[in-house]
C-alpha cells in the first residue's frame, strides 16, 4: 500500500514536472486570456453595454462561468497557481542535476567522454610537460584561466568560461515566480482607487474600485491644479500641487504631473485627470445705475457673497446652476455637469424692502433684470477646478520589478552567454610510446561559432608547440619534426 | 529535357522581369515626379514614403523573380532597391520626427513607419550577415503592405496627450518595433526553411486554403447584408474618425454588390480545400492538380475583390440601414477587412512560391539545418526583446495609471505572444523540436504578433486606444 502510494505520488510529481504539462497549461492560459479579450469584461464595460451586447441567457451563462471577468475568476487564478506549481516542480526536478554540473565542474575527461566529444583533435607532442605548458599558454592568450588537474595516475588542463550560463534558465524561472509572487501580494494586500480634490480641499477618503471608501491615515490637500494646452486645444500637461498633511502638519509637498506621481508611505498618487468641478470661484459683473446717474462699477463675487452697490442697495450671488431648465416659471437644476449654466443674483434695497431677481441668461417671466435699480452685465466667470488622482498601494511591486530585472539578466544568460569548456590531456600511445595531446571543447549553445573558436585554439596551439622546443632539449625537436 | 529547356529560357525570362520592374519603377517615379511638380514640395513625407514604396515594391518583385527563376543578378538589384527604399524610409522617419518633435511612435501610422524601417534594415542584415539572400521575398511584401496601410491611415501630426509624454513610452515602443521586426524575420526564415526542406506542398495547400477561407468567411458572416451588400463602418473625413450613433455604437454603411463578390470569392477560396479533401479521400492525385489550379484562380479573384474593395470603399457615399441619407466611408474605417484581403493574397502567393520551388533555388539558399538554426537565433533575439518590451510597458503603465498590469486586450495579447514563443523555446530545447514543427511554430508566432499589432487595436479599444 505504502509502495503504491509512493509510486502514485512519484507519478503525480513527474506529471507536474513534465514539459508536456507545462505546455498544456500554457495553452490553457493562452485560450482563456484570449477569451478574456473577446468577451466583454465587466470591470471595463458599462452594465448597459453588457446588456446590449448579449442576450439575458447568454449573459447568465457568461457570468456564471466567470467569462465576463476572466482575469479575476477563481479558475483563472487556479490556472496561474498550477502554472507556478509546474514551473516549481520542473525546476526542482531538474535543478539538482544542473547544480551538480555547475558546482562540480567536470574537469578531467575520461576515455569514453574523449571518444565521443565533438569538436576534438590530437596533436603530436614531445612529452607530457611540453603539451601541458603549450595548452596553458595558448588558453592564456585566448583569455582563459587554465587549471592544471592532477589526479593519482593522470593529469590534464581544464579551462572554462561563463559557467553561470548553465544557471540562466533557473534564473528565468525563479524570476517569473518572483513576479507572480509580487502580483499575488498586490492582489491580496494592494488596492486602487480614485480621489478627486477641488483646489484648496483636503481629503483622506479614497473611493475604491468596488465602490467602498478607504480612509488613509493621513490627508492630501490640493493647493493648486492646472492644465496646459497645445495650440490646437488638446491637453499637453496636467499638474497639481499636493501636500501630505499628517496630524495637522505638512509632511510632504510635491507638484505632480502625469507620469510623475507622489509617493508617501507606499501609497502613490497619480495625476489622472483635471477639469471644472461645476462650482464658481469668482463671478465678475459690471453694475450701472438704472437712473443713468452715477458711475459704472465693476464687482466680483463668489457664490452666496453679498456686496454693497451703494448705501442703500446690495447685490447677492444667490445661486449658480451648472445645467438649468425652466418649467412652469420655475428654474430647475437638470444636472451637475457644466452644460447650460445660469447665475442667479438678487439686488435688494433696504429702504424700499424690495428685491429683484437678476438672471444670467435673462430668463423671460422670472427675471427682473430691467426693473432692478442697477443694470448688471456679466463680465467674467471663473470656474473652480478639480484634480483627479489615481491612488494605489502595491506592496508587491518591488518583487515584480526585481523579478523583471532578474528575468532580463536570466534571458541574457540563456541566449547570449555561452558556457565554453576546453580540456587538454596528454596521451601516450601504448604501442609506439609516442605522446599526443588530446584537445576537446564543448559549448552549451551556438555551436557553429564555437567550432570556429576551437579551430583558432588548435591553430594557436600548433604555433605554440612550434616555438616551445627552442628552449627544450634537442631530442624533442626531432620528435616534433618527425611528424 | 524540360529541365534543360528551362535553363536555356532563364536569361530571357530574367531579362524580361528586370526590364518590366525597371519600367514599372520608371513609370511610378515619373508619376511621382508629376505629383511633386504639382505640389511643389520635393521632400514632403508623402513623397518620401511613396519613393520608399516604389523601391520596396521593386525589391519585392525582384526577390520574387529570383525566387522563381533563380537568376542571381536579381538579388544585387533587389538589394540595391532595398537600400534605396531604406534611405527614403529613413528620410521619412527623420522628417516625421522633426515635424512632430517626438520620435514617431505615437500612433498606428507612426509605429508602422518605424516597423517597416526596422524590417527593411533587418532584411539587409540577414542578407549580408547570414547569407539568406531571398529573405526579401517574404519580408518585402510585408513592408509593402505596411507602407500601403500607412498611406491609408491618418497622417496628421498629433501632439502627445499627457499620458504619452514619457521616456518609457519610447523605450517600450522601440523595443516593440524591434521585437516585431525580429518576429517577421523569423517568420520569413521559417518560410525559407519550408521551401528548402522539401516539404509536401499538399499540406501547405490545405493550410493556405483554410486560412484564406477563414478570412473570407469571417468577412461574409459578419458583414454580408440582405441584398448582397457589404456593410462597412462609416467614416467622417473631416474629423478622421468613425461615425458614432451613440456611445459605442458605430454607424454602418452598405456598399451594394460587394457582398456577392465576397461570397463568390469565399466559394472559390474554399474549393482547393474541398479538392484537397477529395484527393485524400479518393487517394487520387489528379484532384491535387485541380486544387493547385483552383488556388491560381482564387488568387486572381482575390486580387479582383481587393481592387473592387479599394475602388468602392476608398470614398463615395453609401446608404445605411440604421439612418437616413448617404454617408461617406473610407479605407481607414475598415483596416481589418483590408488587412484580411491583403493577407489572403499574400498567403496564397506564398503558396505559389512553394509550388514554384526549383532545384537551383535550393542550391542558392543556405541549407535547411542552417536556416533552422538562424530561425532559432532570430527568435532568440525576438524573445528577450518581447520580454523587455512588456516590462517597459508595465513600468510605464505603473508610472501613468498606478498599475503595472491591467489585463487590457493589448497587454493580454502581448502576453499571449510571449507565451507562444516561450512554448516554441521549450519545445525546441527540451523536446528537440527542430525543422518543420519549429518552423510552423515560428509562423504561428508571427501570426499572433500580427494580430496583436493590428487586430487588437481595432477590435477592442482599451488603454492602448491611441496606439
Image (cartoon, coloured by chain):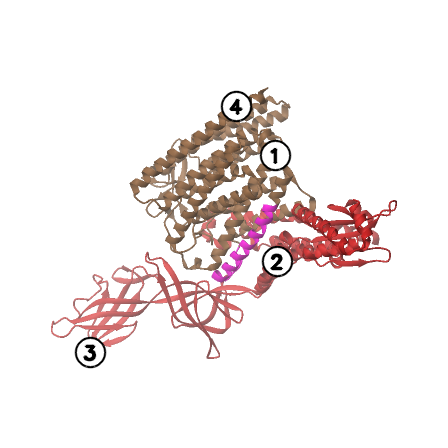
Chain colours: A red, B brown
Residue A2 percent location from the top left of the image: 83, 54
**Magenta residues, start to end:** B377-406
Same chain letter for marks 2 and 4: no
CB under 8 Å between discs 2 and 1: no
Q: Nearer the viewer, residue B25 or B329?
A: B25
Camera-near label (3 vs 4) is 4
Q: Nearer the viewer, residue A221 or B54?
A: B54
Q: CA distance from mark 1 to mark 3?
A: 102 Å
Q: CA distance from mark 3 to mark 4?
A: 111 Å
Determine the chain carrying the residue at label 3: A
Q: Quadrant of residue B433?
A: top right
Viewed as shown, does residue A48 lie left or right of A479? left
CB under 8 Å between discs 3 and 2: no
List the residue tagged with mark 4: B9
List the residue tagged with mark 1: B196
Residue A307 percent location from the top left of the image: 24, 76
The relative height of residue B399 versus residue A479 in the rendered view (above or below) is below
**Residue at image location 40% in from the left, 43% down from the top:** B49
Residue B148 percent location from the top left of the image: 42, 40
Same chain letter for marks 2 and 1: no
Amino acid at each position: 500500500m505504502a509502495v503504491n502510494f509512493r509510486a502514485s505520488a512519484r507519478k503525480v510529481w513527474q506529471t507536474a514536472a513534465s514539459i508536456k504539462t507545462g505546455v498544456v497549461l500554457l495553452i490553457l492560459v493562452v485560450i482563456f486570456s484570449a477569451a478574456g479579450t473577446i468577451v466583454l469584461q465587466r470591470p471595463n464595460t458599462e452594465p448597459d453595454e453588457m446588456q446590449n451586447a448579449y442576450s439575458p441567457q447568454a449573459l447568465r451563462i457568461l457570468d456564471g462561468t466567470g467569462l465576463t471577468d476572466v482575469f479575476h475568476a477563481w479558475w483563472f487564478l487556479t490556472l496561474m497557481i498550477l502554472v507556478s506549481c509546474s514551473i516549481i516542480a520542473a525546476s526542482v526536478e531538474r535543478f539538482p542535476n544542473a547544480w551538480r554540473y555547475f558546482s562540480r565542474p567536470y574537469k578531467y575527461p575520461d576515455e569514453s567522454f574523449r571518444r565521443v566529444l565533438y569538436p576534438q583533435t590530437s596533436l603530436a607532442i614531445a612529452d607530457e610537460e611540453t603539451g601541458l605548458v603549450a595548452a596553458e599558454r595558448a588558453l592564456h592568450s585566448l583569455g582563459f584561466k587554465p587549471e592544471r588537474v592532477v589526479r593519482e595516475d593522470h593529469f590534464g588542463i581544464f579551462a572554462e568560461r561563463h559557467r553561470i550560463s548553465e544557471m540562466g534558465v533557473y534564473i528565468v524561472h525563479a524570476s517569473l515566480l518572483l513576479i507572480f509572487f509580487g502580483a499575488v501580494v498586490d492582489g491580496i494586500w494592494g488596492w486602487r482607487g480614485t480621489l478627486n480634490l477641488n483646489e484648496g480641499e483636503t481629503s483622506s477618503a479614497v473611493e475604491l474600485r468596488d465602490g467602498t471608501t478607504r480612509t488613509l491615515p493621513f490627508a492630501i490637500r490640493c493647493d493648486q491644479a492646472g492644465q496646459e494646452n497645445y495650440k490646437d486645444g488638446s491637453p499637453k500637461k496636467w499638474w497639481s500641487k499636493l501636500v501630505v498633511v499628517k496630524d495637522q502638519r505638512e509632511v510632504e509637498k510635491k507638484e505632480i504631473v502625469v507620469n510623475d506621481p507622489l509617493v508617501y508611505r507606499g501609497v502613490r498618487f497619480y495625476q489622472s485627470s483635471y477639469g471644472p468641478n461645476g462650482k464658481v470661484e469668482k463671478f465678475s459683473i459690471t453694475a450701472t445705475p438704472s437712473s443713468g446717474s452715477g458711475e459704472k462699477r465693476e464687482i466680483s463675487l463668489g457664490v452666496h457673497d453679498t456686496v454693497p452697490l451703494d448705501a442703500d442697495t446690495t447685490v447677492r450671488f444667490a445661486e449658480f446652476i451648472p445645467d438649468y431648465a425652466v418649467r412652469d416659471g420655475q428654474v430647475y437644476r437638470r444636472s451637475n455637469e457644466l452644460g447650460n449654466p445660469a447665475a442667479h443674483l438678487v439686488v435688494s434695497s433696504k429702504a424700499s424692502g424690495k428685491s429683484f431677481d437678476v438672471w444670467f441668461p435673462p430668463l423671460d417671466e422670472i427675471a427682473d433684470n430691467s426693473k432692478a435699480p442697477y443694470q448688471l452685465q456679466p463680465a467674467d466667470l471663473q470656474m473652480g477646478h478639480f484634480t483627479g488622482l489615481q491612488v494605489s498601494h502595491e506592496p508587491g511591486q518591488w518583487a515584480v520589478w526585481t523579478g523583471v530585472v532578474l528575468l532580463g539578466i536570466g534571458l541574457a544568460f540563456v541566449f547570449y552567454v555561452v558556457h565554453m569548456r576546453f580540456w587538454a590531456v596528454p596521451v601516450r600511445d601504448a604501442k609506439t610510446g609516442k605522446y599526443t595531446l588530446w584537445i576537446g571543447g564543448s559549448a552549451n549553445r551556438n555551436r557553429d561559432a564555437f567550432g570556429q573558436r576551437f579551430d583558432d585554439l588548435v591553430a594557436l596551439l600548433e604555433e605554440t608547440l612550434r616555438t616551445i622546443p627552442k628552449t627544450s632539449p634537442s631530442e624533442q625537436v626531432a620528435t616534433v619534426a618527425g611528424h | 529535357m524540360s529541365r534543360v529547356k528551362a535553363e536555356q529560357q532563364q536569361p530571357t525570362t530574367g531579362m524580361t522581369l528586370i526590364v518590366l520592374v525597371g519600367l514599372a519603377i520608371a513609370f511610378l517615379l515619373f508619376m511621382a515626379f508629376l505629383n511633386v511638380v504639382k505640389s511643389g514640395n520635393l521632400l514632403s513625407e508623402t513623397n518620401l514614403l511613396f519613393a520608399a514604396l516604389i523601391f520596396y515594391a521593386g525589391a519585392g518583385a525582384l526577390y520574387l523573380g529570383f525566387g522563381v527563376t533563380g537568376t542571381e543578378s536579381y538579388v544585387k538589384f533587389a538589394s540595391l532597391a532595398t537600400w534605396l527604399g531604406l534611405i527614403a524610409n529613413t528620410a521619412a522617419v527623420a522628417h516625421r520626427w522633426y515635424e512632430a518633435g517626438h520620435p514617431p511612435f505615437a500612433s498606428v501610422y507612426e509605429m508602422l513607419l518605424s516597423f517597416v524601417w526596422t524590417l527593411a534594415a533587418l532584411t539587409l542584415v540577414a542578407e549580408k550577415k547570414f547569407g539568406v539572400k531571398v529573405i526579401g521575398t517574404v519580408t518585402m511584401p510585408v513592408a509593402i503592405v505596411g507602407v500601403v496601410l500607412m498611406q491609408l491611415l491618418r497622417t496628421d501630426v498629433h501632439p502627445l496627450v499627457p499620458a504619452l509624454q514619457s521616456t518609457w513610452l519610447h523605450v517600450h515602443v522601440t523595443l516593440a518595433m524591434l521585437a516585431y521586426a525580429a518576429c517577421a524575420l523569423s517568420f520569413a526564415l521559417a518560410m525559407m526553411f519550408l521551401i528548402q526542406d522539401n516539404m509536401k506542398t499538399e499540406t501547405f495547400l490545405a493550410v493556405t486554403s483554410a486560412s484564406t477561407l477563414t478570412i473570407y468567411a469571417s468577412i461574409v458572416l459578419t458583414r454580408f447584408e440582405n441584398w448582397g451588400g457589404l456593410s462597412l463602418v462609416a467614416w467622417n473625413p473631416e474629423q478622421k474618425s468613425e461615425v458614432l450613433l451613440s456611445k459605442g455604437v458605430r454607424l454602418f454603411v452598405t456598399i451594394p454588390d460587394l457582398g456577392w463578390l465576397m461570397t463568390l470569392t469565399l466559394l472559390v477560396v474554399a474549393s482547393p480545400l474541398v479538392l484537397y479533401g477529395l484527393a485524400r479521400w479518393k487517394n487520387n492525385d489528379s484532384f491535387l492538380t485541380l486544387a493547385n489550379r483552383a488556388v491560381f484562380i482564387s488568387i486572381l479573384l482575390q486580387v479582383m475583390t481587393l481592387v473592387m474593395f479599394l475602388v468602392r470603399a476608398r470614398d463615395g457615399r453609401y446608404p445605411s440601414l440604421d439612418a437616413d441619407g448617404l454617408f461617406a466611408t473610407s479605407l481607414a474605417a475598415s483596416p481589418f477587412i483590408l488587412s484580411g484581403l491583403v493577407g489572403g493574397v499574400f498567403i496564397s502567393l506564398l503558396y505559389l512560391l512553394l509550388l514554384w520551388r526549383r532545384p537551383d533555388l535550393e542550391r542558392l539558399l543556405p541549407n535547411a539545418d542552417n536556416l533552422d538554426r538562424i530561425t532559432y537565433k532570430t527568435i532568440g533575439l525576438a524573445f528577450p526583446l518581447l520580454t523587455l518590451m512588456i516590462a517597459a510597458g508595465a513600468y510605464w503603465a505603473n508610472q501613468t495609471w498606478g498599475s503595472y498590469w491591467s489585463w487590457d486586450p493589448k497587454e493580454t495579447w502581448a502576453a499571449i505572444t510571449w507565451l507562444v514563443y516561450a512554448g516554441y523555446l521549450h519545445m525546441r530545447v527540451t523536446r528537440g523540436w527542430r525543422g518543420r514543427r519549429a518552423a510552423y511554430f515560428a509562423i504561428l508566432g508571427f501570426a499572433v504578433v500580427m494580430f496583436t499589432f493590428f487586430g487588437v487595436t481595432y477590435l477592442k479599444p482599451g488603454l492602448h486606444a491611441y496606439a
